[in-house]
Structure formats: C-alpha cells, structure tokens
Amino acid sequence: KGGKKQIQKLEARVRELENEVENEQKRNVEAVKGLRKHERRVKELTYQTEEDRKNVLRLQDLVDKLQSKVKAYKRQAEEAEEQSNVNLAKFRKIQHELEEAEERADIAESQVNKLRVKSREVHTKVVSEE
C-alpha cells in the first residue's frame, strides 16, 4: 500500500509539473509573439527614423539654398540701391548745371535785348541826324 501511495504522489507531481511545463510553454509562445511584435515595431520606427532623417537633410539643404538666394537678392538690392544713389547724384548735378545754363541763357537774352534797344536807339539817332 505504501508503494501505491508513493506512486500516486509521484504521478500527481508529474501531472503538476506537466501542467507547469504546458503553462510555461504557453507563456513562452506569448512572449515570442510579443517579442516579434516589438521587433516589427522597432523595424518600423527605425525605417521611419531613417525617412525623417532623410527629410531633415533635404529640408536643411533647401533652407541652405534659400538662404543663399536671400543673400544674393539682398546683395543685388544693395547694389541696385548704390547704383540708384549714384544715378540720383548725377541727375541732381546735371539738373543744377541745366539751371545754371538756363540762368546764363536768360542773362544773355536780356543783354541781347538791351543791345537791340540800344542799337535801335543809335540807329534811330543816326537816321534822324541824316
């Protein structure tokens, strides 16, 4: 009888251990599923990170090119402003010279008119003396 009890105890212990093994196998299967799921997620995130990095590089390149264009346009605007100032100074100088020339022309015309009047007076005097 003692041997049967011992065998029953051992068989119960075997069933208990088999259940534990089965439960561990189930947990292991779930853990592997979870691991694969996380590995896929890591792969997706790695891919997305790489795409984001490429986009950042493209955008940085675009920003650099646009900043270059802005600098070029700024330089062109400054050069155009300098040229405009030079042209304005030339215009003002020529305008001043024109005003002076017109003033001299007015003075000369006035003197010519005075000389004409004198010439007529002299001519009239000479004619009346004859």
Image (cartoon, rainbow, N blue to C red):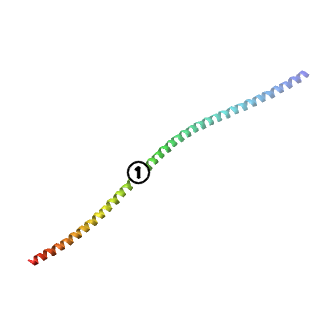
Q: Secondary structure at mark 1?
A: helix
The N terminus, quarter of image: top right
Total tally of numbered discs in the picture: 1
Pick the front one: 66 or 123: 123
Give the image quarter of residue 124.
bottom left
* Left or right of 12 on screen, residue 125: left
* Left or right of 22 on screen, residue 103: left
Which residue is drawn at the image coordinates 36% and 56% (left, top)? 87
Judging by the rendered image, the residue that carries numbered circle 1 is: 79
Give x and y (percent) for residue 130.
8, 77
Q: With respect to residue 28, does 104 lie above or below?
A: below
* Left or right of 119 on screen, residue 88: right
Q: With respect to residue 36, does 112 lie above or below?
A: below
Residue 1 shows in the view: no
Say few, some or many: other residues with alpha carbon within 10 Å of mark 1 (under 14 / 14 to 19 / 20 or more). Answer: few
Residue 120 shows in the view: yes
Which residue is drawn at the image coordinates 83% and 27% (left, top)? 13
Which residue is drawn at the image coordinates 16% and 72% (left, top)? 119
Give the image quarter of residue 52.
top right
* Amino acid carrying mark 1 in the image: Glu
Looking at the image, the residue that sits furthest to the left is 130
Pick the front one: 83 or 40: 83
Pick the front one: 100 or 59: 100
Looking at the image, the residue that sits furthest to the top is 3
Which residue is drawn at the image coordinates 30% and 64% (left, top)? 100
Pick the front one: 60 or 28: 60
Give x and y (percent) for residue 60.
52, 42
Give x and y (percent) for residue 45.
60, 38
Looking at the image, the residue that sits furthest to the right is 1
